[in-house]
């Protein structure tokens, strides 16, 4: 909803796409309810979804944001996703041993993890 100055005061994301990946529904109750039963269709030239009609005075806004993550942040994302937590030492070791995060370096790290002895949190 735009303020009198034209700023968007209440914006609820409904969908997102990162790094040219397929579009997906945004997290949260608003997007879940708004897009219930609707799916994105992927095409070689883009994506398509039919959005529901909005109440009078409501509008959809298409926005774009540019964001880049450092190699350290990319590695942290992988390690946080694939482990029960990571440390600065884990990040330093990954970058020192494998360099930048690539598909090959991630696969090699996962393979190495699968060959480590089992441990327990208890």
Image (tube, grey):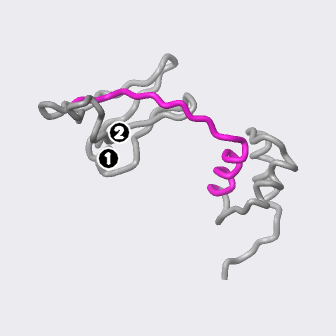
Would you say residue 60 sits in the magenta stretch? Answer: yes
Q: In this orientation, which residue lies closer to the viewer: 73 or 116?
A: 73
Which dot, 1 or 2, sits closer to the camera?
2
Residue at image location 78% in from the left, 40% down from the top: 100
**Does residue 53 sit above or below 91 in this rendering?**
above
- On the picture, is 9 further left or further right than 82? left
Would you say residue 88 sits in the magenta stretch? Answer: no
**Is tag 1's residue or tag 2's residue first in the polypeptide sequence?**
2
Asked whether disc 1 touches disc 2, contact meaning CB atoms under 8 Å apart, the reply is: no
Residue at image location 67% in from the left, 50% down from the top: 78
Q: Which residues are magenta?
A: 59-81
Q: Please give the label number shown on residue 32.
A: 1
Please state the horizontal and vertical placement of residue 92, each as a whole percent of the image: 80, 54
Helix, strand, or loop for circle 1? Answer: helix
Place residue 90 in its image quadrant: bottom right
Please state the horizontal and vertical placement of residue 112, each as a whole percent of the image: 82, 56
- On the picture, is 48 further left or further right than 83? left
Place residue 121 in its image quadrant: bottom right
- On the picture, is 13 further left or further right than 4? right
| Quadrant position of the C terminus in the picture | bottom right
Please state the horizontal and vertical placement of residue 53, each as a whole percent of the image: 19, 30
Mark 2, residue position? 14
Q: Residue furthest bottom?
A: 122
């Amino acid at each position: 909803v735009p303020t009198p100055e034209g700023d968007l005061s209440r914006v609820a994301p409904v969908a997102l796409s990162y790094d040219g990946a397929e579009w997906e529904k945004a997290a949260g109750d608003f997007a879940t309810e708004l897009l219930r039963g609707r799916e994105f269709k992927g095409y070689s030239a883009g994506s398509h979804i039919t959005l529901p009609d909005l109440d009078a005075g409501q509008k959809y806004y298409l926005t774009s944001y540019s964001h880049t993550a450092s190699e350290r942040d990319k590695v942290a994302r992988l390690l946080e996703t694939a482990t029960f937590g990571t440390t600065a030492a884990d990040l330093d070791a990954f970058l020192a041993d494998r360099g930048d995060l690539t598909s090959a370096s991630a696969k090699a790290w996962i393979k190495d993890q699968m060959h480590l002895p089992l441990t327990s949190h208890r």
